Image: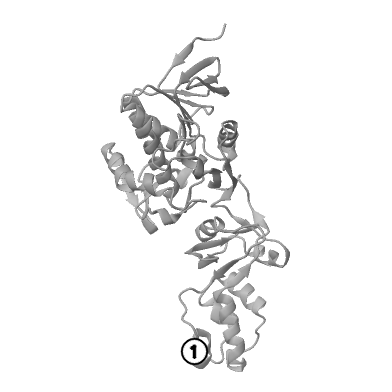
């Protein structure tokens, strides 16, 4: 015999950051909320983030640090639930934290503290959480959603899609959110990997021999530019600067790396005057990791002393080092992507409540939506803000 139907005010699919935040906010407003997740553990992405210490927000959060087909969509939620609001919650739970570079906030201890905090907030709101329950058939009729999960059936007037995107499938991530959104007639912006290493081929294979070498660079793609470390790998390019710029890169396009961002224009001519007997390799070795300096000097093809080189050649070499062009042949895919660009189209949703315009009672939050932040805590802040916005509206 099938189980009797259980009634709730809202059903949240996904026990990640956005889903738990939404459930806690609604539960503490007196709503009867059920959270369902196929995983046996809540907040799996939180647990592996920031090297296990969870980069839980960024104090520099602003809408221009997010990518979306509608760059204005995130403004409402981000403006109403800020990094200061989440930090106040963290401190209320006695979680010690510290700021790293570029406004990134991390737990002093463990990411488990953030998950425990969210679960405690859900408990305070009387939220029912069911983990390890595979989600089966979902239907909608008479103003109610019906969700089969395991051998149970739950019904509610509101349903929240908080199952994230397909990035990091090893922790159980799938494209479930998109399938469900399509079932209800919502449009999808094509998902692609973001915050992901880039792969190289062809002539650029030479750089793979430098696997493990890191350098401070400015990475550029179009008008986007990030100054952080780039890491050369056996497959191509990685490191914070590359992960950031990967969100802006498209197949067939190029990226430029400034290998010497602190050098003023004309520095090579100046070096020629000051040290005419020095070679380009030796000069670059004083500014860059040795193996990288050797490969760059070899590719520039300038041999002998600087004093014997024409100024025009040095200017060309300087320009190339300032904008060394790479044409990646791909990315390392969703398996290595920290997040997903694209997802449920923002045109389908209210920016204030995250509710679907054409399907009353259906909501989408977090990474499932076409809003993607920079590296460094921005995506968690979107999870908190979008989840909170929906939680206030349920």
Q: Quadrant of the N terminus?
A: top right
Instruction: Indicate the position of residue 230 as horizontal and vertical percent values.
Output: 53, 62
* Residue at 35% over, 45% down: 108
Instruction: Indicate the position of residue 25 as horizontal and vertical percent values.
Output: 34, 32
* Residue at 55% over, 40% down: 165
- The answer, for residue 130, to whether it is visible in the render is yes
Vertical placement of 291 versus 94: above or below? Answer: below
- The answer, for residue 279, to whether it is visible in the render is no
4 sits left or right of 192 in the view: left
Instruction: Indicate the position of residue 91 as horizontal and vertical percent values.
Output: 27, 41
46 sits left or right of 108 in the view: right
Vertical placement of 145 versus 325: above or below? Answer: above
Residue reaching furthest top? Answer: 1
Residue 27 picture quarter: top left
Residue 119 picture quarter: top left
Vertical placement of 253 versus 340: above or below? Answer: below
Q: How many neighbours does mark 1 have within 10 angstroms: few (below 14), some (14-19), or many (20 or more)?
A: few
Which residue carries the number 1 mark? 270
């Amino acid at each position: 015999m099938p189980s009797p139907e259980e009634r709730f005010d809202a059903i949240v699919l996904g026990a990640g950051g956005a889903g738990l935040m939404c459930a806690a906010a609604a539960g503490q407003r007196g709503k009867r909320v059920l959270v369902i997740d196929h995983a046996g553990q809540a907040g799996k992405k939180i647990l592996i983030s920031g090297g296990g210490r969870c980069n839980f927000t960024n104090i520099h959060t602003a809408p221009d640090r997010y990518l979306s087909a509608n760059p204005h969509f995130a403004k409402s939620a981000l403006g109403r639930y800020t990094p200061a609001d989440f930090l106040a919650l963290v401190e209320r739970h006695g979680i010690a934290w510290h700021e790293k570079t570029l406004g990134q906030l991390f737990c002093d201890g463990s990411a488990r503290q953030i998950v425990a905090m969210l679960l405690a907030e859900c408990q305070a709101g009387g939220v029912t959480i069911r983990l390890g329950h595979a989600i089966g058939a979902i239907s909608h009729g008479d103003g109610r959603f019906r969700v089969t999960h395991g051998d149970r059936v739950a019904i509610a007037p509101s349903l929240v899609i908080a199952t994230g995107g397909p990035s990091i499938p090893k922790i159980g991530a799938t494209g479930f959110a998109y399938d469900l959104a399509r079932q209800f007639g919502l449009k999808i912006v094509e998902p692609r990997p973001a915050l992901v290493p880039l792969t190289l081929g062809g002539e650029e294979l030479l750089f793979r021999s430098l696997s493990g070498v890191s350098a401070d660079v400015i990475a550029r793609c179009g008008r986007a530019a990030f100054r952080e470390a780039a890491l050369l790998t056996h497959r191509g390019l990685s490191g914070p600067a590359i992960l950031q710029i990967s969100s802006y890169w498209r197949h067939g396009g190029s990226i430029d790396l400034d290998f010497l961002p602190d050098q003023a224009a004309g520095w090579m001519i100046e070096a020629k005057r000051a040290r005419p007997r020095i070679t380009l390799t030796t000069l670059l070795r004083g500014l860059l990791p040795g193996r990288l300096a050797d490969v760059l000097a070899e590719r520039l093809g300038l041999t002998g002393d600087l004093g014997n080189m024409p100024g025009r050649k040095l200017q060309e070499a300087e320009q190339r080092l300032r904008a060394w062009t790479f044409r990646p042949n791909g990315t390392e895919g969703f398996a290595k992507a920290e997040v997903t660009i694209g997802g449920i189209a923002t045109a389908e949703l209210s920016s204030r409540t995250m509710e679907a315009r054409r399907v009353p009672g259906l909501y989408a939050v977090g990474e499932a939506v076409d809003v993607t932040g920079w590296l460094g805590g921005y995506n968690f802040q979107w999870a908190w803000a979008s989840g909170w916005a929906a939680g206030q509206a349920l």
